[in-house]
Image (cartoon, helix red, strand yellow):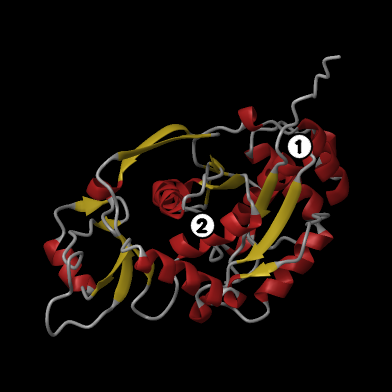
Amino acid sequence: MIVIVPHSRPPVIGRFAPSPTGPLHFGTLVSALASYLQVRQGSGKWLLRIEDLDPPRVVAGSADAILFLLEGLGFEWDNEIVYQSRRFDRYRDILEGLRHQQMVFECGCSRREIFASAPHAGEEGPVYPGTCRYGTGSGRSQRSLRLKVGSEDIFFVDGIQGKQRQNLERDVGDFVLYRGDGVFAYQLAVVIDDMDAGVTHVVRGADLLFSTPRQIWLYRCLGVNPPAYYHHPLVLGSDTQKLSKRDGSYTLICAANGGRMLWLALDFLGQAPPSDLVSASPQEVLGWGIENFSVAGIGRENRSIHC
């Protein structure tokens, strides 16, 4: 007798990782909602991580306020909440492993020196010219630890933005994993956190699209397959710049207006929620979203909204 075993799809594991630098604003809500709906529609796990990696930027009480608001809006997360500030030993262990394999090197360059010697400007600043790759030279103290990059192009297909290509050597250069001020770099922490949690789908704003090849490269150095990436368009403020916590009118999200804000987030994501849902409870809006969410409906262009 031949037994046919149905092919089982791997579980979807997504995450939402806000920085506790102030109240939850509309742009961050869009990221939370898109990630949540994708995971819940696939009957997967939605994880929550607080990215309090850089202590001077953390605003006291904002992490608890974000969690309280998410709960009031009907979001439910799986497993315990992860705090980056409690994972420094893990980051240090991974960094030491990369150092042992001679994949990282000490860099003594100052910002001024990098600006002066960079071969050209990249999208996020000057491209690191490799000054300290083979030694910092006498009399120079270590300022940071950088990961060596290769010369080949990094290709990946983003679930929203489509085909992407970047040459790290030409467009970025060897990049920082441990900063000169003693703080672990975002690129290192986010990869280790997602890797350890088994994250399969990363949904976030398009402002992080340029960082993704660096993270894919780091995954490769660690011998781990990267997750699938989905970079949604950015919400723009009145000045046509990315919405931030400084845009006060969009930070006023609470349980009382949560249903309407979730409706606006669905609309921004191209999901065409029915107009009569705008006055519904947050739980009702989330329920509709889980039933009807489609990544294909999300556009690529950054745009503003009108509340």
Task: Determine crowd level at label 1: few under 14, some 14-19, many 20+ residues with C-alpha closer than 10 A.
Answer: some
Q: Amino acid at mark 2?
A: Val
The quadrant where residue 250 appears = bottom right
| Residue at 13%, 66% in the rendered image | 116
Mark 1: which amino acid?
A: Gly
Where is residue 167 shown, x and y percent of the image?
A: 29, 42
Q: Residue at x 73, y 43 (%)?
A: 39
Drawn side of residue 106 relative to residue 247, left or right? left
Q: Nearer the viewer, mark 1 or mark 2?
A: 2
Q: Is residue 281 visible?
A: no
Q: Nearer the viewer, residue 274 or 16?
A: 16
Q: Foreground: 152 or 180?
A: 152
Q: Is residue 57 above or below residue 236?
A: below
User: Could you give the CA–CA distance between mark 1 and mark 2, rounded to whole angstroms?
Assistant: 23 Å
Farthest front residue in view: 1
- Describe residue 242's horizontal placement relative to residue 294 as left or right: left
Q: How many marks are shown on the rendered structure?
A: 2
Q: Which mark is residue 191?
A: 2
Label 2: how many residues lie within 10 Å, few (<14), some (14-19) or many (20+)?
Answer: many
Query: Where residue 42 is drawn, which disc sits there?
Result: 1
Residue 281 or residue 297, whichever sits in front: 297
Query: Picture quarter containing residue 151?
Result: top left
Circles 1 and 2, Cβ within 8 Å, touching? The answer is no
195 relative to 111 in the view: left or right:
right
Residue at 83 percent of width and 50 percent of height: 282
Q: Earlier in the sequence, mark 1 or mark 2?
A: 1
Above or below, 219 relative to 162? below
